[in-house]
Amino acid sequence: MRRQPYLVANWKMHKGMKEVESFVATFLQNIADMPSGKCDVAIAPQAIHLSLLQNALKNRVGVVAQNCGQSPSGAFTGEVSPVALKEAGVKAVILGHSERRWIFHEADTLITARVLAALEAGLEVILCVGERLVDRKEGKTFLVLEEQLRVLELVPGARLPKITVAYEPVWAIGTGETATPAQAQEAHAFIRQWIHDHFSEITAQSMRLLYGGSAKLENAASLLAEKDVDGLLIGGASLEPLAFAEMVRLGVRSQA
Ligand code: PGA
């Protein structure tokens, strides 16, 4: 089954307003010659810049939130409502990112609640899963992935097409140490098989699986060439408009 490549920039807590504006100008200019409909592209800025980005990007590129609250509304100081995100034109939300899990102590129960609230609000979800170095060294990579994927067991079947899974080994995030294409493929194949076993062949074949963790221009093509790597979730390397545009070009080419 053909799965459209999907490249998502995760800007984390980077970029001020002026930097967002100049990024967009350069980026749009550099992707202008690329055929549309060959690679889905999205950017996840800080929450305060979602609308700014939404207005500047003119629909060519989707806007993604980096997190959302676990309820449509309520007394949750500091959280952003998934309903408000949807109203603002946001396409998807990243949930379960390792920085949320390990810095902000978000557990699978909270991540599950956020996933369900996001889907209920009509947002797509990019669910991040991934093992730490210690897990990998102890041979527990698949065990950890399995634990984190269990969030999906509570998602109503009809909403599964709204989910993208991002495999992000924690040891590769922001470290400059990328998983080899073979390591990424091995984890992606495991995730696809898990989806097959828990849902169906159709769901497993249609769900997009992204790789994240020091993905950059130099390694993007070889990662995208792997059978089960359908796209990339890119942190550091996506902050630079020319580098991100060239990665999008590789995404387009991977469809050729
Ligand atoms: P990185 O971040 O590309 O800077 O490693 C990826 C991510 O955290 O999504």
Image (cartoon, rainbow, N blue to C red):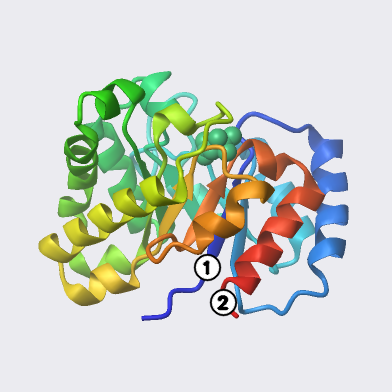
Q: Residue furthest left?
A: 197
Asked if one can make out residue 117 in the rendered structure from this viewpoint, the answer is yes
Closer to us: 35 or 73: 35
Residue in the picture at 31% in, 48% down: 187
Quarter of the image where one finds residue 157: bottom left
Which residue type does callout 2 highlight?
Gln
Residue in the picture at 49% in, 44% down: 212
Residue in the picture at 26% in, 54% down: 191
Residue beneath label 2, please? 255
Split into quadrants, the picture shows ligand 1 in the one at: top right
Closer to us: 133 or 145: 133
Q: Secondary structure at mark 2?
A: loop
Residue in the picture at 32% in, 47% down: 115
Examine the rendered structure and indicate whether residue 208 appears above or below residue 102.
below
Examine the rendered structure and indicate whether residue 169 appears above or below residue 30.
above
Dot label at residue 5? 1
